[in-house]
Image (cartoon, rainbow, N blue to C red):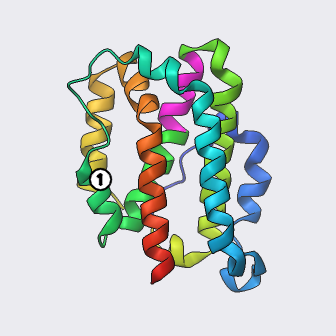
């Protein structure tokens, strides 16, 4: 593994929580209650996204492109699921959300809250290893990042406009992992 990417400034206040979130799963009794906790964490993400959804979706002018395709959902469900979910969370926290904060000052607080909620979910998933025992690059992720970069500023609107799809994909992945 290479060096870890820098933590985006909007997420620095949560760095201590993230560091605490790296303890082994057996030392975390909260992992026993994870199946009950996950739906509420996903609901928090959805509620927070609703605050900004209309703005970002209205700014998305290129409706012929979809970043989060069914290919990504299939990767979430397959053997690359762990890696794909981890990489998508990193993509949103390191690229999409910081860019979204710069494009809309009126939505900075909600976007920051969304980033913190996503960071908290990822830390919880890492603590409970059966959800995140991995951490390499998928084909869908490569395509998503290339399209996002090619779209420039419109990529932010596209990715933020599809955040609800991302939450749904995470939920499907977690539901599948819970059964295993």
Q: Which stretch did the figure color magenta?
A: 94-102
For the N terminus, the quadrant is bottom left
Say if residue 24 shows up in the picture. no
Q: Would residue 6 appear left or right of 9 to someone viewing this image?
A: left
> Which residue is label 1 attached to?
72
Q: Would residue 165 appear left or right of 30 to someone viewing this image?
A: left
Asked whether 20 falls inside the magenta stretch, the response is no
Residue 74 lies in what quarter of the image?
A: bottom left
Q: Residue at x 50, y 49 (%)?
A: 89
Mark 1 falls on what kind of element?
Answer: helix
Q: Would residue 98 appear left or right of 20 to someone viewing this image?
A: left
Residue nearer the viewer, 90 or 170: 170
Say if residue 156 shows up in the picture. yes
Q: Residue at x 23, y 28 (%)?
A: 65
Percent coordinates x, y for residue 83 in the rendering: 40, 63
For the C terminus, the quadrant is bottom left
């Amino acid at each position: 593994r290479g060096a870890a990417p820098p933590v985006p400034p909007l997420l620095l206040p949560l760095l201590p929580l993230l560091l605490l979130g790296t303890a082994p799963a057996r030392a975390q009794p909260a992992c026993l209650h994870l199946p009950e906790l996950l739906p509420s964490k996903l609901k928090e993400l959805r509620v927070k996204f609703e605050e900004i959804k209309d703005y970002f979706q209205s700014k998305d002018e290129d409706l012929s492109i979809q970043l989060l395709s069914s290919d990504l959902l299939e990767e979430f469900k397959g053997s690359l699921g762990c890696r794909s979910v981890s990489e998508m969370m990193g993509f949103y926290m390191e690229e999409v959300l910081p860019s979204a904060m710069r494009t809309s000052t009126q939505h900075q607080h909600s976007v920051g809250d969304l980033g913190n909620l996503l960071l908290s979910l990822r830390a919880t998933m890492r603590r409970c290893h059966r959800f995140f025992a991995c951490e390499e690059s998928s084909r869908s992720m490569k395509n998503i990042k290339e399209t996002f970069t090619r779209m420039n500023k419109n990529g932010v609107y596209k990715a933020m406009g599809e955040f609800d799809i991302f939450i749904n994909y995470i939920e499907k992945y977690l539901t599948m992992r819970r059964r295993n």
